[in-house]
Amino acid sequence: MSSGNHEPISDKDISADKNGTNRQEWNWHPDLPITNNPLFEMPWKMAAIWAYHRDTWLRLSEVSFFLLLAIMSFYMLQPVMPAKGDTSNIGWLVALYAINLGLVGLVAGGLHWFLYIRKGQGTKRKYVTSFGHKGGGRFNFGRQVYDNKFWTLASGVSFWTLYQAIILWRLNNGDAHYIGWNDNPALFSLIIFLTGSWIAFHFYWGHRFLHVGPVYKWVHALHHRNVNVGPWSGISMHPVEHAIYFSSVFIHLFVPSHPIHVFFHMYMLGLSAIIGHSGFHALFIANKERVLLGHFHHQLHHRYFECNYGSVDFPLDRWFGTFHDGSQEARISLKNRLKK
Ligand SMILES: [Zn+2]
Ligand SMILES: [Zn+2]
């Protein structure tokens, strides 16, 4: 499923050191090979499954942060939500748009400022040494960061808010399957727990479609202008890609849901992409590694294109032979696959 528009992989890229990794390729990389969510690896290793979910849900991670943020956002929006059936009050839409714009500005703007302008941790845990693309030939407005900000703010936050508003409005009016915590705490929790895997499943298929020749050329190539990614690259996408990418949230029209599920889902799409594209694996504050940032699985996708269409949450890449675990063997097998 090659678009034919990608940089060829040279033999130099395949040469590796004795550990099976290419020193020139990465400034820093996590332990290789990278692995998937151990819940889907057979036979089950209970210690690995526990560690994965403890680090995701019980420690400061992007997922636990999004859950807290979703709960806060729900209570922030409540005072301006109209009464059931009241369609004249659209102030809540403005509030929702402002929340989303503010969060994107804080997360993308904050990470870009700290990591790329202030260079607050130098190249510590940075996947590649250079800070973004020099020169702006292929970017709108002649510069990567202007291009990325434009597509993120003009199209990204608009689709995000529009989709979220449609579902919140339907939940508020009792058209969808509303569920409160007290109705069924186990189901309420299960929906939160499964959100990441559903997003990974949806993302994989949407993303594979975006890599089909003409679709890649006219739509997805805009996102792939960024080989060396930064926080503003995360949801810098063509509007058609935004329409596809954010559409996983419509699942909440069909499964029992609460607005908190919808907020959480949107942060797992929008904010997670921003953090995952930051180009740094972890954030250091006061010389200590505080929280994981970059998604190396997706960094490999930006480097090699025709691999890792999904995420580690749900191992479709492994099942369908498109998984790149960062190892020399994976590089060679990708090269052979592309030759075919
Ligand atoms: Zn990307
Ligand atoms: Zn892609």
Image (tube, rainbow, N blue to C red):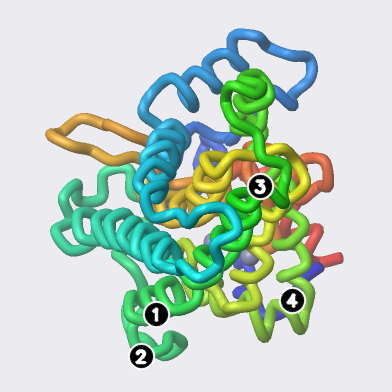
Q: Mark 3, residues whose alpha carbon is within 10 Å: few (<14), some, or many (≥20)?
A: many
Disc 2 designates what residue? 141
Label of residue 283 in the image: none
Q: Residue at x 23, y 38 (%)?
A: 284
Say whether mark 3 is within 8 Å of ligand 1. no
Q: Are marks 1 and 2 in contact (CB under 8 Å)?
A: yes
Q: Disc 3 and disc 2: Cα gap in Å?
A: 32 Å
Q: Determine whether the residue tagged by mark 2 lies in a helix, strand or loop.
A: helix
Q: Mark 4, residues whose alpha carbon is within 10 Å: few (<14), some, or many (≥20)?
A: some
Q: Residue at x 44, y 41 (%)?
A: 70
Residue projecting furthest to the right: 340
Q: Disc 2 and disc 4: Cα gap in Å?
A: 26 Å
The mark nearer the N terminus, 3 or 2, is 2
Q: Which of 269 and 305 is in front in this view?
A: 269
Q: Are marks 3 and 4 in contact (CB under 8 Å)?
A: no
Image spot of residue 294 (x, y percent)? 43, 46
Disc 1 designates what residue? 150
- Amino acid residing under circle 4: Ser
Say whether mark 4 is within 8 Å of ligand 2. no
Image spot of residue 46 (x, y percent)? 65, 9
Q: Disc 3 and disc 1: Cα gap in Å?
A: 25 Å
Image spot of residue 302 (x, y percent)? 55, 62
Q: Disc 1 and disc 2: Cα gap in Å?
A: 9 Å
- Amino acid residing under circle 1: Phe
Report ligand 2 position as a quadrant: bottom right
Q: Determine whether the residue tagged by mark 1 lies in a helix, strand or loop.
A: helix
Label of residue 199 in the image: 3
Q: Is residue 281 left or right of residue 176?
A: left
- Amino acid residing under circle 2: Phe
Instruction: Tell me the quarter of the picture where residue 111 sits.
Output: bottom left
Disc 4 designates what residue? 3
